[in-house]
Amino acid sequence: MSISSESVKESTALEAVVDVPDGVQISINGRTLEVKGPKGKVSKDLSKIHVDIRVEDSSVRIRPLLARGKPRRKDKAIVNTMQSIVRNMIEGVLHGYTYKLKIVHAHFPISVKVKGKQVLIENFIGERSPRVAEIVGECKVSVEGEDVIVKGISLEDVAQTAANIENATRIKEKDIRVFLDGIYIYAKEKGM
């Protein structure tokens, strides 16, 4: 039983390919990946991620930077993670992302205001000082009745902003089954 050299090369080669649709431009400046599209521009710093990314005609090729001979499980995980990140960046510059949060209160009505790069949550469970949540990146936050809507082209920024708002209203040292007040994510959508 012999193993051909071609089958060994195929099994050790680890590569992911992401197709780039029309209207999207991808460029690499040093260790920064930039994706431009109709909705805007998103960039990602790759200095701490050990992958080799090459932009070809209409695709992006991702390979691990191997310090040893053959790829390991972590190398495959890094390549797949980078593939998802690139896909999310492309989807963001084409369509954008929207997270919707619901304001829930039982007794004290919660007032939510956007001021600059912060979301102020006032009168939360009767507190006198407002709770503050940071808006990350170029996200747009709006309050429409009982809903808080977070929109943007970077999935990481939109998700982190929504998480910051949700965590700002986390009630500690009380039973969360009884104290349901807060702001909770209820929808994650593609498109702005």
Image: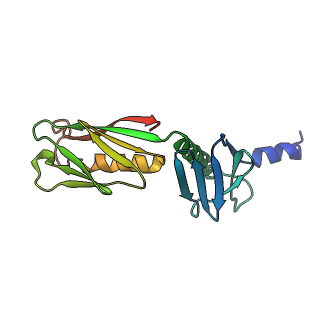
Residue 1 relative to residue 41: left or right: right
Viewport quadrant of the C terminus: top left
| Residue 137 spot, x, y in % from top left | 42, 55
Which residue is rendered at x = 29% and y = 45% of the image?
Answer: 166
Identify the image quadrant of residue 186. Answer: top left
Above or below, comparing residue 119 to residue 180 in the picture: below
31 or 51, nearer to the observer: 31
Please say which color scheme the image uses: rainbow
Above or below, comparing residue 163 to residue 52 in the picture: above
Q: Is residue 128 visible?
A: yes
| Residue 83 spot, x, y in % from top left | 61, 46
Residue 133 relative to residue 154: left or right: left
Please tell me how many numbered marks the rendered image carries.
0
| Residue 113 spot, x, y in % from top left | 23, 49
Which residue is rendered at x = 25% and y = 55% of the image?
Answer: 132
Which residue is rendered at x = 17% and y = 41% of the image?
Answer: 175
Identify the image quadrant of residue 51. Answer: bottom right
Residue 121 relative to residue 58: left or right: left
Residue 8 relative to residue 122: left or right: right
Viewport quadrant of the N terminus: top right
Which residue is rendered at x = 47% and y = 36% of the image?
Answer: 191
| Residue 165 spot, x, y in % from top left | 30, 48
Q: Is residue 51 visible?
A: no
